Amino acid sequence: MKKLSLGYSPCPNDTFIFYALAHKKVRGSVEFSETLKDVETLNRMALRGELDVTKVSFSAFCHLRKDYCLLHSGSALGRGCGPLIVAKDRINIADLAGKKIAIPGKMTTAYLLLQLFDHDIRNVVEMRFDRIMNAVSMGTVDAGLIIHEGRFTYPKYGLMELVDLGEWWEEETGLTIPLGGIVAKRGLGAEVINEVDRMLKKSVEFAFANRSMTRDYIKEHAQELDDEVIDQHIGLYVNDYTLDIGDGVAAVRELLKRAEELHLVPHSDKNIFID
């Protein structure tokens, strides 16, 4: 049986959808060896070709299309789920370009959306996503770009929302917010890639049907252990697009197009999915 390296984040939406694969509740012609890392680390690992199948930001996928294709299952898209810019004190939006902003990584979709929102923002500091709110609260940076469960917990740090980049994207394009997806090495071949896609969809279906069974695994890895926050997180980032990206691929294509037009990412003629 073929064994593939599989990367995903410790965030509740990923541990939820990958629970069945990790615990062999879904069977197929391949097996997986899991690596759990924050999404920016996974982005960098994929850029080095270290993982056969992995969660990545759609921003990173812009740089990976030569060697990786997108799977139809496992993506994080939706509405009302975008990254936020937060600060301790009110900052005029026009002044953001002159402020020091913490970001969760230059390969994250959050940072790409920030660049699309304001091309002049360049004074950024990269740090792990779960350290950003504390850095803003302590005054180490002027503002922070937050993702994941930070969307629900930032008020606990005495912070306020300045910009909802997801809301901006939706108003600008009318499309869903494309955050991240699951990619596979093209070199695996169509047969293996389609089998992985099938198994992943079954894993998502299993999670929806057996939510309570996934809870201990989610809590084992979650930054925020509060059940309500975990449920909010999963409810926001796991939806019908996670089962099958379907027409959500239009949002991915629009993100890639806009990033290419501004020369933020390299151009590629590769099909998003396996040929």
Image: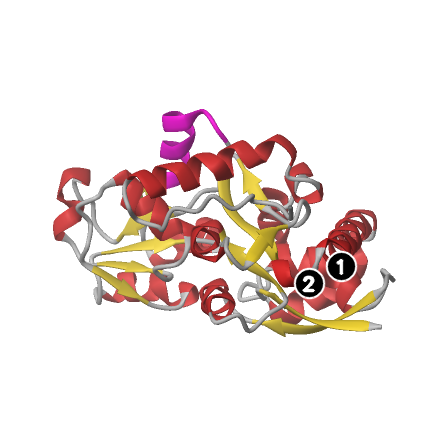
Q: Which residues are magenta?
A: 164-175
In percent of width and height, residue 73 lies at: 68, 47
Using the rendered image of the protein, determine whether residue 80 is visible from the camera's viewpoint: no
Which image quadrant for residue 230?
bottom right
- Left or right of 202? Residue 158 is left
Using the rendered image of the protein, determine whether residue 210 is visible from the camera's viewpoint: yes
Query: Total number of numbered labels?
Result: 2
Q: In front here: 210 or 62?
A: 62
Amino acid residing under circle 2: Leu
Establish if 218 lies above or below 112: below
Q: Main secondary structure of the magenta part?
A: helix
Label 2 packing within 10 angstroms: few (<14), some (14-19), many (20+):
some
Do labels 2 and 1 touch, CB within 8 Å? yes
Residue at 56%, 36% in the rendered image: 249
Label 1 packing within 10 angstroms: few (<14), some (14-19), many (20+):
some
The residue singled out by tag 1 in the image is 192
Amino acid residing under circle 1: Val
Quarter of the figure that contains the N terminus: bottom right
Residue at 36%, 27% in the rendered image: 172
Q: In front here: 121 or 238?
A: 121
Q: In front here: 6 or 225?
A: 6
Establish if 135 lies above or below 143: below
The residue singled out by tag 2 in the image is 188
In percent of width and height, residue 141 lies at: 22, 62
Q: What's the CA distance linking mark 2 and mark 1?
A: 6 Å
Residue 13's tag is: none
Residue at 73%, 52% in the rendered image: 197
- Left or right of 118? Residue 12 is right
- Left or right of 202? Residue 107 is left
